[in-house]
Amino acid sequence: MRLDKYLADMKCGTRSEVKKLIKAKRVKVNGEVMKDASYDVLRSDVVTLDSEEISYVEKEYYLLYKPAGTVCALEDRKYPVVMELIDSRRKDIFPVGRLDLDTEGALLITNDGKLAHSLLSPKHHVEKTYYAETENDLPEDAEKLLETPMDLGDFITLPAKAKVLSSRSAELTVHEGKYHQVKRMFEKIGAPVSYLKRISFGGLDLTGLEKGDFRSLNEEEIEDLKRQTEDPA
Ligand code: URA
């Protein structure tokens, strides 16, 4: 991106105003005065105006296949954090919600705080689908039990969607993301979870990703997530 557009996008002035700033030698790239308004700013460049760093604020959206043994936090004393798996220059990205230490699967990472907040709100009913294996056999009426609102003590689950896959495995789609929700739901029906993986989040699944891999979302996927958080008219 051209230096003058970069500065204009970052609200340093209009395109002609920033050209004047550049001419007046008030803009530096990597510590050197840059007089060429058409200079192509690289991602790694540090641009300053009157010595104040002007970083290009843009939203980033990643889907990570979180491996077990990683923590959904910005830092942790004991375990590697999911952020270490994302190769981004941005310092302000964070995981949207949490998966437990031993849970793997689809995790959205972004610096779009507004979208993250909306995606986590039960009001918007964003679907999260989990694959679970259980320590013992699921009850015969497992699907009905999991789908019907369930009192977990601190809250009552919204209607969910369940599909039993075998005597000890099932998929469960929920709309909330309460603490240990899925494990607590299976526990409640007498079949504690032995393995848990989130296979999709808001329609984004793990296709093409290996454990520990991440990819950027495309425009269509970002728009689709935003659509899911729109309030009904
Ligand atoms: N529900 C859980 O119990 N654990 C997770 O990691 C995610 C949902």
Image (spheres, rainbow, N blue to C red):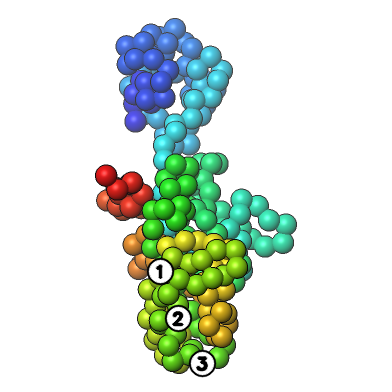
Is mark 1 in CB contact (under 8 Å) with mark 3?
Answer: no
Q: Whole-percent x and y of residue 198?
A: 46, 69
CA gap, disc 1 and disc 3: 23 Å
166 over 160 or under it: above or below? below
**Residue 28 visible at all:** yes
**Quadrant of the snapshot with the N terminus:** top left
| Label 2 element class | helix
**How far is disc 1 from disc 2 in space, using C-alphas?**
10 Å
Q: Earlier in the sequence, mark 1 or mark 2?
A: 2
Disc 3 marks a residue whose amino acid type is Asp
The residue that label 2 is drawn on is 145
79 relative position to 92: left or right: right
Residue drawn at x 40%, y 82% as measured from the top left: 143
Q: Pinpoint residue 29: horizontal percent, then vertical percent.
A: 48, 24
- Marks 3 and 2, how far apart at CA: 14 Å
Q: Whole-percent x and y of residue 10? A: 41, 24
> Mark 2: few, some, or many residues within 10 Å (few <14, many ≥20)?
some
Is the C-beta separation of discs 3 and 2 under 8 Å? no
Residue behind mark 3:
137
Q: Which mark sits nearer the N-terminus, 1 or 3?
A: 3
For residue 131, what is the image quadrant? bottom left
Residue depicted at x 44% and y 42%:
114
Q: Which mark is residue 159?
A: 1
User: Does residue 95 sit above or below 135 in this rendering?
Assistant: above
Q: Give the percent coordinates (x, y) of residue 102.
A: 59, 71
Q: Is residue 67 visible?
A: no
Q: CB of mark 1 within 8 Å of CB of mark 2?
A: no
